[in-house]
Amino acid sequence: MVSRVIPVDTFDLVIFGGTGDLARRKILPGLFRRFIAGQMTGESRVIGAARSELDDAGYRDLVCEAIAEFGGAEKDSGRLEEFLARLHYVPIDATGEGGWSDLRDLMRDGVVRAFYFSVAPSLFGALAERLHSNDVAGPDARIVVEKPFGRDLGGARELNATLASHFDERQIYRIDHYLGKETVQNLMAIRFGNVLFEPLWNSHYVDHIQITVAETVGVGGRGSYYDKSGAMRDMVQNHLMQLLCLIAMEPPSQFEADAVRDEKLKVIRALQPVEPHQIVRGQYDAAAGAASYREDAENPRSFTESFVALKLGISNLRWAGVPFYLRTGKKLKARSSEIAVVFKDLPHSMFEGDEKRHRNILSIRLQPNEGIDLQVTIKEPGPGGMRLVDVPLDMTFADALGDEAEAPDAYERLIMDVIRGNQTLFMRGDEVEAAWRWTDPIIEGWEARSDVPKLYEQGSSGPEDAQMLIHRDGRRWRDIRG
Ligand code: NAP
């Protein structure tokens, strides 16, 4: 099935940090794919900005190399030159005064103006202020800001206040690329677009919910950055929290930015505080030929966690008593992200001799092989009575809907949403602050207790204590499968 591509309005997108890793790996190859897909109209332009002294030709060379490295199949489309012709470059230091008038002269009236802050968060304030004071942005401009959005509540508030002094909330797009994933949006389509699930989506029918984001990579290469953050700040406060919100929120009155974000915010506000026995931190150990976390982080005394597993509860009518188990970590046995809704056992089985516990499980796979799978119980084929067996009703999107390559990746989709002016899949300032308000006491508790993370074997499912966290409730984690 060929996906329908709706062109967006003509835009000028300025990428501050246009020479950096994120721009080269994700943003620019993504824009190229949208260009090929026909979504970027003829007059739209991309303007790179950073301190490096490049001209348009030099920037086009840099982007050409980035697309050769990260562009996927589209790099051979024969349309690269056409795309490169839409690129420009202005040397600008976010903290200096040079270059701003050149940028202002380059911007056009009557097209969407968007500014992607793909630079360190410490530069967000300087950029916002200079965009404003040099009259580059305009009242309808949009700004896109990357994670991390603060490293605690105080930092997030400060950042929100800085941005708010120059831009309205409706102009600010805080990216969490998990929200741009096809399956994450499908989660909402499944919940709210089918009559089947919503009546069961509550404590009467759901036994528990698991959210797993497992990676096989370590922190090597970005160890010193990661060591100041850790899995709680880097993954749980944002990505896992966003997934939790979408799974747990009440149906919004419409699929519209503030209606969705209001409901997500209510979930975060209803989260119960996490007691120390409800959370396990881990750090990957050295393995044959592979460095330990501490070696990768170049910090022999690091207490930073590369793994977190936690159990949490939501204080509202829908979810009272239903545990949510979340875990994320690095150097685990497979790269796999999944949300699993595990339904309760049948109150009575009429099938004599059937002692096995059969459960319906709705599993939403974010990676790899984005798709949805519903475990159902059926009769084992053949004679010999009613023996029951659990089988998956599997819907891998690539199989069901055609070439997966046609689905835009998360960054592509989110950038196009910025141009459309659709904030539904972006975090609002109060949401981010509420998530930090819940996260901060957990981290402060670790710091106050000088909590030492448990070591775990590389290629495992995390520390033994993480198994105990769920086993003592008579439940088990789902296997981490790639
Ligand atoms: P990076 O590779 O270090 O690139 C930083 C960019 O900022 C470069 O283009 C650099 O170019 C520019 N820059 C630095 N100082 C500047 C200044 N004073 N004025 C103007 N430009 C300046 O960083 P990155 O990995 O691309 O990350 C960018 C942002 O995205 C960060 O906030 C990061 O946390 C976030 N992020 C990154 C990833 C990722 O996968 N890389 C994922 C999620 C979030 P010059 O040196 O030429 O100025």
Image (cartoon, rainbow, N blue to C red):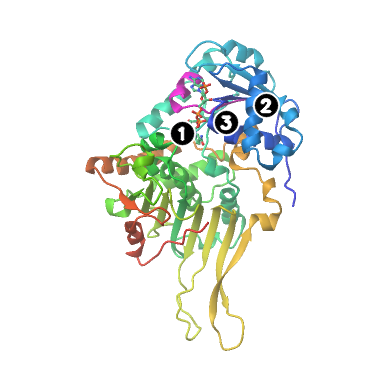
In the displayed structure, would residue 427 be above or below residue 241?
A: above
Three-letter residue code for mark 3: Ala
Three-letter residue code for mark 2: Phe
Which one is in front in this view, the residue at disc 3 or the one at disc 1?
A: 3
Residue 106 percent location from the top left of the image: 66, 15
How far apart are the two marked residues, 2 and 1, measured between alpha carbons? 25 Å
Q: Is mark 1 within 8 Å of ligand 1?
A: no
Residue at 58% across, 54% down: 192
Residue 238 percent location from the top left of the image: 45, 42
Asked whether, in this view, residue 461 is left or right of residue 196, the answer is left
Q: Residue furthest front?
A: 289
Q: Is residue 191 visible?
A: yes
Q: In terms of secondary structure, where does tag 2 sit?
A: strand
In the displayed structure, would residue 18 be above or below residue 271?
A: above
Asked if labels 1 and 3 touch by Cβ distance under 8 angstroms, the answer is: no
Q: Which residues are magenta?
A: 114-128
Q: Is residue 280 visible?
A: no
Q: Is mark 2 within 8 Å of ligand 1?
A: no
Which one is in front in this view, the residue at disc 2 or the one at disc 1?
A: 2
**To which residue does mark 2 refer?**
11
Q: In terms of secondary structure, where does tag 3 sit?
A: helix
**To which residue does mark 1 refer?**
429
**To which residue does mark 3 refer?**
23
